Image (cartoon, rainbow, N blue to C red):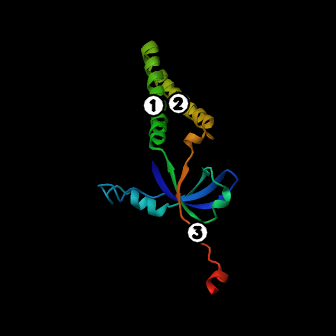
Amino acid sequence: MLKEQARIVAIDNEAVWVETIQLSTCGSCAAKKGCGQSLLASVEAKPNYLRVLLPAGDANDYQLDQSITIGLPENIVVNTSLLLYLLPLCLMLATSAFAHSYYASESLTIAMAVVGLFLGGMAIRFYSYKYQYDPRFQPVIVDREEIIIFNENALRA
């Protein structure tokens, strides 16, 4: 499971909205500062807001600004990444190969490659719209920071 630290910014009945800061993976990379990713990450560290489904517990168990750990199964990330990158590429290659083998026109081959890439993008858009609210593809709360509320009257006794 891929995990990320987040902070709760809003609470609904069935979900919480969390804020995460996109961090670079340069600390674990062998190139360290050689690729420039760490520089871009330090300049453009923008918060991301995500809707995270609540577990079977009550929404009253969570508070604003509470720190939680969210997670997403690795197989979901791998499978959707493969689909996202390979489907448009394969459709682009298939449509351009079809046009080249039947019409042998370079301009038509290029046009069909663009059409295939566009069709792949539209298929990805349909896929993401169809599974937008599917709980299998939503991040879940893995762990949370316990918030301790002190009672001043109990301390005086």
The correct choice, above or below, for 41 with respect to 104 in the image is below
* Name of the residue lying farthest toward the bottom: 156
Measured from the top left, where is residue 102 in percent x and y?
A: 45, 13
Question: Cβ–Cβ below 8 Å for labels 3 and 1?
Answer: no
Measured from the top left, where is residue 118 in percent x and y?
A: 54, 31
From the viewer's perspective, tell me whether residue 52 is left or right of residue 2.
Answer: right
> What type is the residue that disc 1 sits on?
Leu
* Name of the residue lying farthest toward the top: 102
Q: Which residue is mark 1?
A: 89
109 or 156: nearer the viewer: 156
- The quadrant holding residue 28 is bottom left
* Name of the residue lying farthest toward the right: 13
Measured from the top left, where is residue 136 in percent x and y?
A: 56, 40
> What type is the residue that disc 3 sits on?
Ile
> What type is the residue that disc 2 sits on?
Gly
Q: How many marks?
A: 3
- The local secondary structure at tag 1 comes to helix
Residue at 30% across / 55% down in the picture? 31
Report, in whole angstroms, how far the alpha carbon at label 3 lies from the one at label 1. 48 Å
Report, in whole angstroms, how far the alpha carbon at label 3 lies from the one at label 2. 47 Å
Q: Which residue is mark 3?
A: 147
- Dot label at residue 120: 2
- The local secondary structure at tag 3 comes to loop
Question: Cβ–Cβ below 8 Å for labels 2 and 1?
Answer: yes
Task: Say few, some or many: other residues with alpha carbon within 10 Å of mark 2 (under 14 / 14 to 19 / 20 or more).
Answer: many
- Dot label at residue 144: none
The correct choice, above or below, for 124 with respect to 2 in the image is above
Report, in whole angstroms, how far the alpha carbon at label 2 lies from the one at label 1. 7 Å
The first of marks 3 and 2 along the sequence is: 2
From the viewer's perspective, tell me whether residue 90 is left or right of residue 127.
Answer: left
Quadrant assignment for the C terminus: bottom right
107 or 72: nearer the viewer: 72
